[in-house]
Amino acid sequence: MATSINPEKFLPKLLVLVSQAKAVAGTEGERFENLKKQLDDVITDGLLTKVKLLDQILSRQFTSLERRLGKIIVGAETTNSTVEAINQALDSMDKDVQKIKQWMHLRELMPSPEPTPEPQVKWVPVVQLDLAKEMSKKWSQLGLQGRFDDSSTMANMRRTYENLENLQLKLCLLSFSIFPEGAVIKKRPLIYWWIGEGFIRSTQQKTAEEVGEEIFQNLVMRKGLNIQPHLKASTSSRAVSVNNCTIHPWIRRMLISLAGEAKLFHFDSSWSRMPSYDSSNCRHACLVADNLIPQGNNGPKVDNLLTLFNVSVQYLDMKKEWLNKLKKVKVLQLGRWQSSASYHIEVEDETTLKGLGTQKHLIYLSLRGISRVSQLYPSILNLVSLQILDLRACHNLETLPSDISSLKNLTHLDLSECYLLEGMPKGIEKLSSLQVLKGFLIGQKSACRLGDLSKLKKLKRLSIHMGNVLEAVDQKEEFKKLKDISSLRCLKVSWGVVSPLLKEKIKKEPLEFSFPPNLEKLDLQGIPMERVPQWLNPRQLKNLKKLYIRGGELVSLDHTETDEWMVETLRLKYLKLEIDLPRLKKLFPHLQRKSSVDHEIEEGRYDGDIVL
């Protein structure tokens, strides 16, 4: 019999064998009927649909039942088995069935192999944490962990891991082990973590982030790892780019085992499903709800920590003195790693962040989505090795240090969705290594102007927000200087709320953009003009491959140019365009199937969803 079976198909076969054995034995009919009833219970209790992941472990019991029934059938037909022998076989089969039922009921405590949709994945509540502990305890009592570790399924998974081309891929894969069951894992925090740890580095041809993109795609799409990518319904199967994924429960269990062996993370023996911290043999720690790291004098040493990752703690209650001890840390992921705003984190005392400054080796710092952070203290300017600073969605953030030019190693700065900021600090234009700048605010109180960014020769991605559109209109000449950022490939421009009076002013004094020649992606949000502005034309954007327009007043895409757009991906959302589908295709003749419009064009209006 094969080492892996399908219980749903195999169990009916056993029922047939029981009936045959009963007929052949000619005795102990009641015992056979009882055995048949127990197997019937397994089907009627609906456990078969939940047990498929356990088929490797259960194979021995199913095989044993098949073998014993076969012996009765063959033995009775040839040598007239004794009643005593049949009773002994039935006793053994009863035990086999009891083990099968016990393990199947255990499956009810186990996670579903199906990915959980992101909006339903919340912070792990105490009830679920207790369930995880209970399940871990049951696994230990029944000896299932050892059986699973020794199973052929685990052996195949390990072979896939061992056959990865290099140590870089293996370390990146093991980092998936810390995330909760069913969690949707976003690629961006992962890549930033890998950069901070030094798992990935830039090459002569590619930035470290581009290397990370390739590795993430490699792992998610690789056969045998069973990492489940999350794709939008409208995504074409060609040239798919995956932004997030879910780890299959058994792959996660294997990664936990391997990460523990490699001493990358410590997983508590009494609670092996979530990471813990052991200062004696591990330099990576996680902040996990209901299993916090003690910070007092009796707590574990943290001076040698390389990574501190907030997995599921919502209320950060860290002492400044404790943060000061993290002198060798390279990665501080304190903010959320999920993109949804429903994942709420807040700091108990924002003065805790004054402890950020002693970490001279810190490369990646994330405070993303943390509430009650109103200012970033000047001590952060002492983080001389910092490359990635993620402050996205710190909605209470009002004040940044006046001059950040000392953070000369910064490659990524994300200030998007920090709506209380009134301006940009001085010194951004001196960050010569900057590759990504998000949330650049146009305002009178900005010490750094848009034109100053032309000094950043490595800047590839830029997002601009005009919170006060009137101030943007007053600085309209600055937008012409965008063309001087020659390295720029991706640009996003978003407008704030525009009053009717301001709309009239914009009509009389339109903004004039001049784009860099090699721009490949343009994302416009909340555009306040009804007609296509002069600057949005194919002649000025000859190399543009992606055009996204979301929200705003735009009702037409017609332009006066005779040139045709070279755009391959067009995404239009929340618009009331007065255009028919043939005209749209004529304007954009090079669109690929993955381009999408959020409204169906019918009689000149958009009413539903279509994919071009």
Image (cartoon, rainbow, N blue to C red):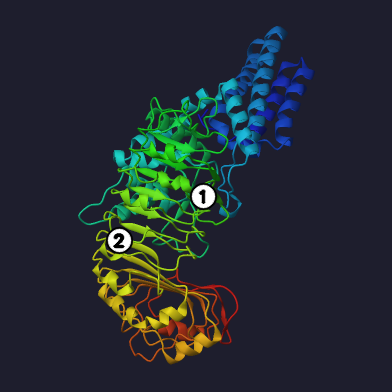
Q: Which of 340 and 304 is in front in this view?
A: 304
The amino acid type, in three-letter code, at marker 1 is Val
Q: In this view, does 375 lie to the left or right of 202?
A: right
Q: Which residue lies furthest to the left in this view?
A: 204
Q: Is residue 485 above or below residue 305?
A: below
The amino acid type, in three-letter code, at marker 2 is Gln
Residue bearing the label numbered 2: 435
Q: Position of residue 323 (x, y in %)?
A: 42, 40
Q: Is residue 575 left or right of residue 513?
A: right
Q: Is residue 242 above or below residue 576?
A: above
Q: In this view, does 65 lie to the left or right of 526?
A: right
Classify mark 2: residues with Cα within 10 Å, few (<14), some (14-19) or many (20+): many
Image quadrant in which you'd find residue 6:
top right
Q: In this view, does 457 lie to the left or right of 220?
A: left
Q: Nearer the viewer, residue 407 or 253?
A: 407
Residue bearing the label numbered 1: 184
Classify mark 1: residues with Cα within 10 Å, few (<14), some (14-19) or many (20+): many
The kind of secondary structure element at disc 2 is loop
